[in-house]
Amino acid sequence: MARRVLVTGGAGFIGSHIVEAYLAGGWEVTALDDLSRGKASQVPDGVPLIVADIRSDLARTTVATGGFEVLNHHAAQIDVRFSVERPSADADINISGFVNLLEGAGQGGVGRVVFASSGGVVYGDPDVIPTPEAAPKRPISPYGVSKLAGEHYLRALGGLHGFEGVALRYANVCGPRQDPKSEAGVVSIFVSRLLAGKPLAIFGDGKQTRDYVSVRDIARANVLASTAPLGSGDDHDTRAFNIATGIERSVLELAEAVGRVVGRKPELMMEPARPGEILRSALDPKKAADGLGWRPEVPFDDNLAMLMEWFQTEG
Ligand SMILES: NC(=O)c1ccc[n+]([C@@H]2O[C@H](COP(=O)([O-])OP(=O)(O)OC[C@H]3O[C@@H](n4cnc5c(N)ncnc54)[C@H](O)[C@@H]3O)[C@@H](O)[C@H]2O)c1
């Protein structure tokens, strides 16, 4: 019998790729999404889509009664600025919504919960780059706090209810279906603007770095994390893995790479630095290699090319 998984946020950017990766691995997949940002059209044909808010009774009972072996949780409020303006609304979705689902997981005998955390925010402004999992967690934004709180709930409620929790701390995810209107999607913004012949905005000197990982590699990590044997330990880092390349790329290098792939020299618009922006970020992916057998595989330029193709055909 096929293994059953529920993917929350399954109509969104990352979630829809995860749904596809589970299907390719022979899993029986159900998606749950309130379609606040996701699109039903991004859920593959034949995959049931439950339209529900993760804070609802419907979402909790779906987890509790669906006979799922794995709950894969990607539904979230993802806007850092929104979390700064409305921290209680952010916590309501990202903390209370997740805890609601974890209650359902406890009631339904779910075996494992895979949680989308964020290495870009839980470490804050790290001292060590590439940052390992054991580094201090000093989130700066309410969104970052909500991800860290989610990791703690996962460990504590897993211990109480008997499910295994694994947290995947992503670097900057990019690839097809990334909304260029979202503030996190700098790669997507650059590709869509250059295709439209528009200049690219660079904030500050453009030397700030990020670690860009392909959404296809992220999806593969989720399938691996659903069955890999997990270590035991007494803190939330034990079952947390950075999913990243470990490679720092500056915004200027990114603009150059986008120009190379699109085949057009970008015009750069230099803007003042944004206050509070972290200057360097890259995550150490060694633990995921050892613990999950995961390594990034999609070359950076190939991922940019896939994103460009998506904009040209469907975006
Ligand atoms: N994009 C990145 O670089 C990145 C990095 C680290 C972590 N993450 C995490 O990965 C997950 C997916 O992010 P994404 O970039 O695909 O964003 P996304 O907005 O495309 O996906 C989130 C999905 O959740 C749904 N959703 C939002 N609120 C909901 C609610 N209350 N109930 C039910 N569904 C709801 C949205 O409709 C959307 O389809 C999120 O948990 C995000 O925090 C993303």
Image (spheres, grey):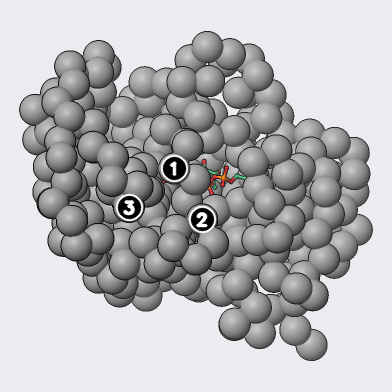
Task: Determine the residue positioned at 37% across, 33% down.
Answer: 121
**Could you tell me if the residues under marks 2 and 1 are in contact, i.e. CB atoms within 8 Å?**
yes
Q: Earlier in the sequence, mark 2 or mark 1?
A: 1
Tag 2: amino acid:
Gly
Say which quarter of the image contains residue 20.
bottom right
Q: Earlier in the sequence, mark 3 or mark 1?
A: 1
Q: Where does the image place residue 311, in percent across and percent down from the top left? A: 44, 58
Residue at the spot of label 3 = 195
**Circle nearer the viewer, 2 or 1:** 2
Q: Is residue 267 visible?
A: yes
Q: Which mark is residue 180?
A: 1
Image side of residue 131 versus residue 216, left or right? left
Q: Earlier in the sequence, mark 2 or mark 3?
A: 3
Q: Where does the image place residue 226, in percent across and percent down from the top left? A: 57, 68
CA–CA distance in space, label 2 to label 1: 9 Å
Q: Where does the image place residue 257, in percent across and percent down from the top left? A: 17, 56
Q: Please, which residue is most extreme toward the bottom here? A: 1
Q: Residues within 10 Å of mark 1 (few under 14, many from 20)?
A: some
In the picture, which quadrant includes the N terminus?
bottom right
Tag 3: amino acid:
Leu
Image side of residue 193 versus residue 100, left or right? left
Residue at the spot of label 2 = 315
Q: Is mark 3 within 8 Å of ligand 1?
A: no
